[in-house]
Every structure is written in C-alpha cells, then in structure tokens.
C-alpha cells in the first residue's frame, strides 16, 4: 500500500460558509422569513458551513438530488452518496431571496439563499440510497417523514463552539488539519463510531495506527437513534480508551452530523467527510453504518472497494470484528486466529447492555474496566 502524502478536501477545496457575528446580527434583525429546522438539519447545516461536506456549499436542488440518488454522484461527476436536503413544511411561503434558519428556540442558525424549491422524491431516495422503503428503518423514517417540498441553495451558518465537554471537542476540518500539521502527521487514519469503544475497536485502531502517523478518533455526536449512549458519557469513555495510546499519536474530536444508518452509502459519506477533516485512511468495520439486518456484513466494504481510488481519495481500511482469543492469548479476527468461536471472548451488544445495566463489569478481555464503569454509572442515572 502506497501511503498518500497529504489529504486534499473532496473536490479540491475546503468549503467555508461561516457567518460572522456582524452578518448574523444583520440577518437576525433583517426581517427575513424564518424556517425552523430539525435537529438533523441543524447538524447538516453546521457540517456544510465548516466544510465537512465539501464540495457542497448548500442544500441540494432537484437535479443534484436526482443525480446523487440515482448515480451516487453530483451532476459534475464527483462522487457523493447521500442527498443533503432541507425540508420546507407546508404553509411557509418562499419568494426567492433569503430565508433565515432557526432552531426550535428561535435562535438564528444561518441563512439560505433560495435558489429553488422542488418536490423531493422521497420514495426513490429511500429505495436507492437506503435500499428499502421500510419506515421501521430509522434513516428511511427521517426521509419519509420529511416535507414533500425541499428548499435548495447556498447557505451560511453560525459556527459557534458548542456547549460542554462534547462541544469543546467539536473541531472544524480546518482545525483538525492544523492539528495534524502541528503534530507532523502526513498520514492519519480516521475512526468513526457512534458507540462506546471496547477492546475490539481499540485493537482495530491500533492495527491501523501501526501503518500511519496518527489516529483521529472521530465519534459522531449529532442526532442518533433512541437507545444510543449519550454523547457526554461516550466522550469520557473515549478519553479512557485513549489512555492506552501515546498522546502524541491520537486526537479525539467530535463530528457533529446526523446518523443516517444508510449502511454502504453512508460508509462512503463517512470516508469523504474524514477526507475533508484531513485523514488519508479510514477504518471501515463490519456492517458499517448499518442498522438491524438491512445490510450484509461486508456490503459497505465491498461498495468502497468497488470505487476507483482517485474517486474516493482516501484509503479505506477494511476490518472484520475483533475478539480476545483465550488460546492465542491475544486479540485477533477471523483473518488472524484459527480457533473456534468457543475460544473467543465475544458478547453481543444486547448482552453487554444488560450486564452494564445490572451493574456488572464485562470480562476485562472485552472491555476496559474504566470504560465499563463509566457506562454502568450512565445506565444507573
Ligand atoms: Zn486464537
């Protein structure tokens, strides 16, 4: 494998659509019509403004939507797997011009220069992007529940530091790129997760880090689904795991973006976003970004492997599930350990959750005690 020397943003340039305080004040008092956005749309808006979704500079229009849904590409041919849309609820009149975007409390988040209002083909989007129109799929439900009309156009958004221990970790792509340069990392592997990290993930991160200069542990902290562990708890658990890495080799940052659970297509999005954050390599696990049994365990890895390397511009590192093997006396995967399942310390997600909820520590070969204790505390409160 030939390591890349640096990572160019997708499309060549990092998009910066931040609204400064003066501009935000003018927009807030400018008498523009307002649209209250959902939590997921607000997270997308921030990702657009910081360049996490480069080359996108705004919410997609009809032609782009169709091209992304059907071809997995923007109209100019650039790889882009999932539409980023802004729903326009009934009753809101748009006559062109600009629309102020606000959260439920009325705070100004940004502004969209309205280029187009179009009927979003939500059925086609669900079927082609998610592979199903089943409303039990949480990502599909969000698409089908979105308004039939979408408003498109370039955005600008307020990118303020977020509150709390998670907010201070929410670096922008230009900030992580600067941090990598400061550390002298030419090659960086990104690890996406929305869950606590146990020994198995620690092992994958260490295997990957053996091949590159640095590791970006980049948990997603946007809106997720019910039952996911709260972001504040997860951040403390990640800090505990990173105690087992040299501090000069790791960076923990939070990615503010909605989880879509789109499996293979979302694995591409996760890789492109990490490319924008400056990563050269990206870990793709088993059933990456999947939910339930909608996707095969290696569908995401196969889709990524099928793409021309220059289209992706970041090297996917494909891993199977890892476990502790009692006979190897080591961590391994089906690729590296010859012993049967009975020799492996493996717990299902459900088993781990019920142990933690009962205040029981999983075996130390499965989970670091300091991580498990944080999770037990969280389940008790
Ligand atoms: Zn073994």
Image (tube, rainbow, N blue to C red):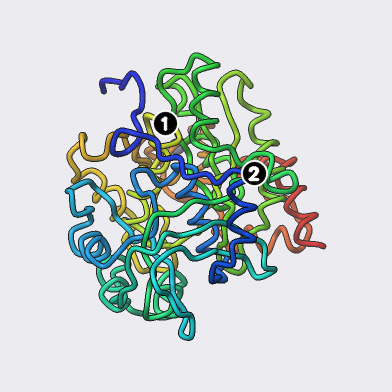
Compare marks 1 and 2 and give the one earlier in the sequence. Answer: 1
Label 2's element? loop
Residue furthest out toward the top: 184
Q: Which residue is mark 2?
A: 367
Q: Relative to 264, is 191 on the left or the right?
A: right
Residue furthest out toward the bottom: 91
Label 1's element? loop
Asked whether mark 2 and ligand 1 are closer than 8 Å, the reply comes as no
Q: Which residue is mark 1?
A: 279
Above or below, 234 against 350 in this view is above
The residue sitting at 59% across, 43% down in the picture is 20
Q: Nearer the viewer, residue 301 or 341?
A: 301
Report the mark closest to the observer, 1 or 2: 1
Q: Relative to 227, is 296 on the left or the right?
A: left
Q: Nearer the viewer, residue 162 or 198?
A: 162
Q: Report crowding for label 1: few under 14, some 14 to 19, many 20 or more residues within 10 A (C-alpha).
A: many
Above or below, 50 against 104 in this view is above
Residue 94 lies, in percent from the top left, at 43, 75
The residue sitting at 43% across, 30% down in the picture is 278
The residue sitting at 75% across, 47% down in the picture is 164
Q: Nearer the viewer, residue 84 or 222?
A: 84
Q: Quadrant of residue 333?
A: top left
Q: Quadrant of the N terminus?
A: top left
Residue 84 lies, in percent from the top left, at 38, 60
Q: Relative to 17, is 164 on the left or the right?
A: right
Ligand 1: give its quadrant: top left
Q: Relative to 347, is 322 on the left or the right?
A: left
């Amino acid at each position: 494998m030939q390591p890349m020397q640096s990572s160019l943003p997708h499309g060549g340039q990092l998009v910066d659509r931040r609204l400064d305080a003066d501009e935000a004040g003018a927009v807030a008092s400018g008498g523009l019509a307002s649209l209250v956005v959902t939590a997921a749309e607000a997270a997308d808006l921030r990702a657009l403004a910081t360049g996490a979704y480069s080359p996108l500079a705004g919410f997609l229009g009809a032609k782009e939507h169709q091209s992304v849904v059907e071809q997995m590409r923007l109209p100019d041919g650039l790889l882009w797997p999932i539409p980023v849309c802004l729903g326009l609820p009934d009753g809101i009149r748009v006559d062109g011009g600009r629309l102020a975007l606000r959260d439920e409390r009325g705070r100004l988040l940004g502004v969209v220069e309205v280029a187009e209002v179009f009927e979003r083909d939500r059925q086609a989007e669900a079927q082609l992007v998610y592979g199903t129109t089943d409303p039990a799929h949480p990502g599909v439900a969000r698409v089908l529940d979105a308004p039939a009309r979408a408003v498109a156009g370039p955005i600008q958004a307020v990118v303020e530091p977020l509150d709390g221990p998670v907010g201070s970790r929410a670096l922008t792509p230009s900030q992580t790129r600067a941090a990598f340069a400061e550390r002298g990392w030419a090659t960086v592997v990104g690890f996406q997760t929305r869950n606590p990290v146990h020994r198995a993930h620690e092992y994958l991160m260490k295997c990957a880090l053996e091949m590159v200069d640095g590791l970006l542990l980049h948990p997603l902290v946007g809106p997720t689904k019910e039952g996911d562990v709260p972001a504040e708890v997860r951040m403390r658990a990640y800090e505990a795991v990173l105690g087992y890495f040299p501090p000069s080799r790791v960076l923990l940052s939070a990615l503010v973006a909605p989880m879509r659970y789109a499996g293979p297509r979302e694995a591409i999005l996760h890789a492109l976003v990490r490319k924008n954050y400056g990563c050269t390599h990206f870990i793709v696990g088993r059933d990456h970004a999947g939910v339930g049994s909608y996707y095969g365990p290696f569908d995401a890895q196969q889709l990524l492997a099928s793409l021309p390397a220059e289209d992706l511009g970041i090297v996917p590192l494909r891993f199977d599930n890892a476990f502790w093997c009692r006979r190897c006396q080591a961590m391994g995967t089906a690729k590296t350990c010859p012993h049967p399942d009975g020799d492996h310390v493996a717990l299902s997600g459900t088993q781990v959750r019920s142990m933690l909820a009962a205040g029981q520590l999983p075996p130390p070969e499965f989970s670091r005690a300091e991580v498990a204790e944080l999770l037990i505390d969280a389940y008790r409160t």
